[in-house]
């Protein structure tokens, strides 16, 4: 399991607004090169977004299914990138104050070779990737204007 927690200098609603914007995923999810499409009801349970992951010409198509959506505190996703496999990603937000949010991202390999590669080196790589993803998400939320 790769788990990362960070305090974001933005209200919980503003952080969740970044998660609700499926078109922003390539801005903060490390490894996502391009968003191909986002269903209109994203991130409601059962909705999808389609991505390309990797670096051209080695990028591959994938999609992310929303498994659970409880705004503004919880989002559970199932990124799928075959032949690598599937993950379960849980994003949990909790209010520290009117201007600060605790953001926790947990990632678990769910199916395919990613699940079989559960070794310390793989966990370290996933952890480092998630640290950067959470940093990018925090940067977007902190710069975003309040509506």
Image: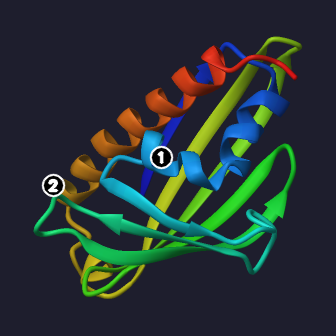
The circle on residue 36 is none
Q: Residue 81: which quarter of the image?
A: bottom left
Residue 120 in the figure: left or right of residue 19: left
Q: Position of residue 11 (x, y in %)?
A: 81, 21
Image quarter (top left, top right, bottom left or bottom right) of the C terminus: top right
Residue 12 in the figure: left or right of residue 114: right
Q: Secondary structure at mark 2?
A: helix
Q: Position of residue 95 (x, y in %)?
A: 83, 26
Q: Position of residue 109 (x, y in %)?
A: 40, 73
Note whether residue 86 is visible. Answer: no
Q: Position of residue 134 (x, y in %)?
A: 49, 35
Which residue is disc 1 drawn over? 3
Q: Nearer the viewer, residue 42 or 98?
A: 42
Q: Earlier in the sequence, mark 2 or mark 1?
A: 1
Q: Cα distance, mark 2 to mark 1?
A: 15 Å
Note whether residue 84 is visible. Answer: yes
Residue at image coords 75%, 81%: 46
Residue at image coords 74%, 64%: 42
């Amino acid at each position: 399991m790769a788990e990362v927690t960070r305090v974001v200098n933005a209200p919980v609603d503003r952080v969740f607004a970044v998660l609700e914007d499926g078109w922003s995923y390539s801005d903060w999810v490390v490894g996502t090169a391009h968003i191909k499409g986002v269903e209109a009801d994203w991130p409601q349970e059962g909705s999808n977004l389609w991505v390309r992951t990797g670096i051209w010409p080695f990028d591959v198509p994938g999609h992310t299914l929303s498994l659970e959506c409880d705004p503004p505190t919880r989002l559970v996703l199932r990124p799928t990138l075959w032949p690598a496999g599937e993950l379960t990603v849980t994003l949990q937000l909790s209010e520290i104050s009117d201007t600060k949010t605790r953001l926790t991202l947990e990632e678990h390999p769910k199916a395919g070779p990613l699940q079989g590669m559960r070794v310390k080196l793989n966990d370290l790589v996933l952890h480092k990737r998630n640290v950067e993803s959470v940093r990018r998400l925090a940067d977007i939320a902190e710069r975003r204007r309040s509506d």
